Amino acid sequence: GLAEGDGAFSYEAHVRRGGKKLRACDLDKRDYKRRFGELDVAFLAKEIARGEKELDARMQEAGEEAIGSEATQIQQWRNQANGHLALLKKRGAFSFLGLPPESNETDVQKRYKKMAFELHPDKGGDHAKFKERLVQP
């Protein structure tokens, strides 16, 4: 099982460490809370892993109001996570194209066409070789 404050799902597993140089993807506890809310990821992982009997016991123990509040928090967290995921996908696509996140549709189209030309197996990005292939019988 998952222990409190322990393992890959805890904030502590991902906090900044001492004087180590950080990568852009390293976050501290404050960053995680700002991005994903006050809900603890370890708590969510435990909720997902609970069996039917454990879940029934938890629901009887907590009461309707607490369960409703937790359900609302989980839904809010899911909505925030989905929003962040959409942003990451968009940034990932821009990164793949070598464009900054503030690029517009025209920039994306130009870069896509350039990359398609450079990567096309028949063209290889070299205009002379491309013309030579077109002229050969």
Image (cartoon, rainbow, N blue to C red):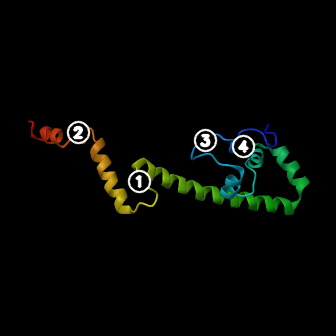
Q: Position of residue 17 (x, y in %)?
A: 69, 41
What separation in Å lies between label 3 and label 4 (alpha carbons)? Answer: 22 Å
Type of residue at label 4? Phe
Type of residue at label 2? Asp
Q: What residue lies at 68% left-to-right and 44% top-to-bottom?
A: 16
Q: Residue furthest right?
A: 61
Of marks 3 and 4, the one in the foreground:
3
Per the image, the residue denoted by label 1 is 99
Per the image, the residue denoted by label 4 is 9
What separation in Å lies between label 2 and label 4 (alpha carbons)? Answer: 47 Å
Q: What residue lies at 37% left-to-right and 57% top-to-bottom?
A: 108
Q: Position of residue 109 (x, y in %)?
A: 34, 57
Per the image, label 2 sits on a secondary structure element best described as loop
Per the image, the residue denoted by label 3 is 21
Per the image, the residue denoted by label 2 is 122
Work out whether mark 4 precedes mark 1 in sequence or the reverse, and give the earlier one: 4
Type of residue at label 1? Leu
Which image quarter: residue 106?
A: bottom left
Work out whether mark 3 precedes mark 2 in sequence or the reverse, and give the earlier one: 3
Compared with residue 135, is residue 94 higher up or lower down, i.e. above or below?
A: below
Categorize mark 2 by other alpha carbons within 10 Å: few (<14), some (14-19), many (20+): few
Work out whether mark 2 precedes mark 1 in sequence or the reverse, and give the earlier one: 1
